[in-house]
Amino acid sequence: MKQAILFAALAPLASLTGVQAKPVDSWITTIWDDFKEAVDCGSCQALLGGLKLVAGLGESFFEDVLTGVCDISGAEDSDVCSGIIANEGPAVYYSLKNLKLGSHTAKTFCASLVGLCDFPAVRPYSLSFPSPKPPKSRPPPSGKPPIKVVHFSDTHVDLSYETGSNFDCTKPICCRVYTEEDAPGNTSSPCGSWGNSKCDPPQRLQQSMMDAITSLNPSFSIYTGDVVAHDVWLVDKTEVLSDFNATFSTMESTLGLVYAALGNHDAAPLNLFPSTNTPSTYNPQWAYDALTTYWLSLTNNNQAISTAKKYGSYSALHKTTNLRIISYNSIFYYKYNFFSYEEPMPFDPDNQLAWLISELSAAEAASERVWLISHIPSGNVDHFRDHSHYFDQIVQRYEATIAGLFFGHTHTDEFQISYSDYDHRSWDNAVAMGYVAPSMTPTSGPPSFRVYEIDPVTFGVLDYTQYIANITDLEGEPEWVPYYSAKKDYGGKLDVSVSVEEELTPAFWHNVTVAMEKDGGLFENFWARRTRGFEVPACEGDCVSNEICALRGADAQFSCVERKPGFSFEKRGERRDLLGKRFQPECNHAGMAPLLAKIAHRASLAREVEG
Ligand SMILES: *[C@@H]1O[C@H](CO)[C@@H](O)[C@H](O)[C@H]1NC(C)=O
Ligand SMILES: *[C@@H]1O[C@H](CO)[C@@H](O)[C@H](O)[C@H]1NC(C)=O
Ligand SMILES: *[C@@H]1O[C@H](CO)[C@@H](O)[C@H](O)[C@H]1NC(C)=O
Ligand SMILES: *[C@@H]1O[C@H](CO)[C@@H](O)[C@H](O)[C@H]1NC(C)=O
């Protein structure tokens, strides 16, 4: 480790002193040793120093060293190591080269990616609002008959899915023919016709789900992103464009009006959506362009969608009502977007927050109602805390105009509440409600979609019903059935009952979390519903209070999530098998970042073994 610190100090001189003469193999050993010695924030900075030094020797040298380290760690199959590093290596190389050891950016890197630094405190930033907050509050329900709106997310269709192929492979996703042994007829673990929990689903599951949605006759739908499959070590532009076409064409021919948001998988390489501070060669403009074309035909709103080409965000007024839907790019604030580790980290990448303020301000002046839709929940552990806080300040300023927030990404069924006073979180200072819908891809529970009952005037959520289909060993057509309903299955457990006409307000949801504290059974229901009953992990004691705190944590710094060494991809109390090569591919479990965490974890095991 001392060696790495020394090297880091000498980094600028590296190319002059002949250090590059050291062969790749020797660097692989050095960096692997640095991983083994990385046990705290200081040694994580030293590891970054070592990596910076290698980066100083050139991009391809850097990628060769990292690939070698991945191989000796045994974190993934060799082809997965080299594929992920070929895809995302350039971004890691770029950010490491610019990183300043010990900076806010570097600490955020070590906190978010390998869990070895505490999350640095949120940096103060004063947002500028064109007018002070008016003395307005959320409008009461109109009493008019509700409309239905469907919310679905994280479809991740795998166009290479093969029925009968092996579901028990060593790759991040299975149900593809990687080897002769995986072929239908050759494997004793055949994938069914509609999907498997170790695989992304076939297109026919998506068609079935969209047909089921259509038969419920919704007014329109919202889709919170992630079209592309989890073959993150193979995915390229051609595959992304085919995936876009398959998914959006099906939406268009089946669902009609859909408002969509950008997902972290919706480009190749995944996760990498740089701001304009980064050289434009890294910009996935082709993905923004393609998405803009599909979103334009799905919403038929030229004026609004023209802004999407910039960075995948738009603001669209619904054709026949006063509902404005603002879809914004949350990947700018995503801890696995390596380009966001800028030095210094911008307070407002590409001024998107300023744009949100101007849209909300105009909506307030025009007495419109607003829904904010995006992929990554702003209170999630994957979201930078700084930007979570700034975003929450905006939500609080416009709480009377924002009727709801809608997210995906986690693949699980969750929610997040915003408060005007996080030190005294209570039903009477709960100000906004973020709904997190679970995924269609069945990797963390049965495929699912949600049907909201919406007030046609205020656009408040009056109720929702979650639908699921059991696809295990299914021969016939999937049956999409109601799983639970919010008002009956949560509201029915409260002391104060909520009538059919009433909205599910932020106060209502706060009261649900209070009821969970008193009634362990209600918390267990919520906990099981997260994964639709699939492989429900144990959660008791601190886990329960932390999870309830997370529901009350739309401002991420108050969500009670603490960094855990080597477990940065462990989600909310859920312990996964890090030793096994396979782990459930979720959106935040894909690509370079979990690979680094896995390498760090395997290094810590190697350290223990070597004593
Ligand atoms: C099944 O495996 C055998 C060899 O084990 C191979 O010859 C054959 O081509 C495989 N079948 C398929 C469809 O790949
Ligand atoms: C796009 O998707 C549609 C519907 O699935 C299909 O008919 C068409 O061939 C696809 N086009 C391309 C260019 O892949
Ligand atoms: C799903 O279907 C399979 C096969 O019919 C059955 O064994 C299983 O119990 C079902 N799961 C649920 C949760 O109903
Ligand atoms: C929440 O609970 C408080 C205290 O029991 C109660 O006064 C309030 O009416 C409840 N609000 C809703 C929306 O259920």
Image: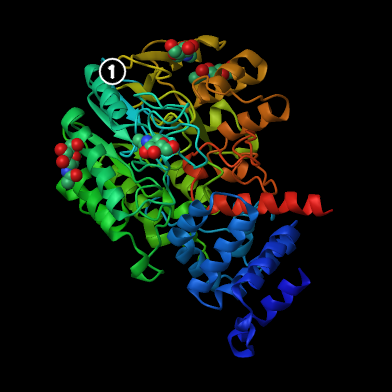
- Image height check: is 396 above or below 47? above
Residue 92 is situated, as x and y percent measured from the top left of the image, at 51, 64
* Residue at the right extreme, as displayed: 611
Q: Residue at x 46, y 64 (%)?
A: 91
Residue 398 is situated, as x and y percent measured from the top left of the image, at 40, 42
Q: Is residue 8 left or right of residue 144?
A: right
Q: In which quadrant is the N terminus drawn?
A: bottom right
Q: Residue at x 62, y 41 (%)?
A: 558
Q: Is residue 374 left or right of residue 509?
A: left
Q: Which residue is mark 1?
A: 146
Check disc 1 and give the amino acid type.
Pro
Q: Foreground: 347 or 561?
A: 561
Residue 218 is situated, as x and y percent measured from the top left of the image, at 24, 22
Q: Residue at x 59, y 57 (%)?
A: 70
Q: Is residue 34 left or right of residue 482?
A: right
- Residue 408: tell me if it is visible: no
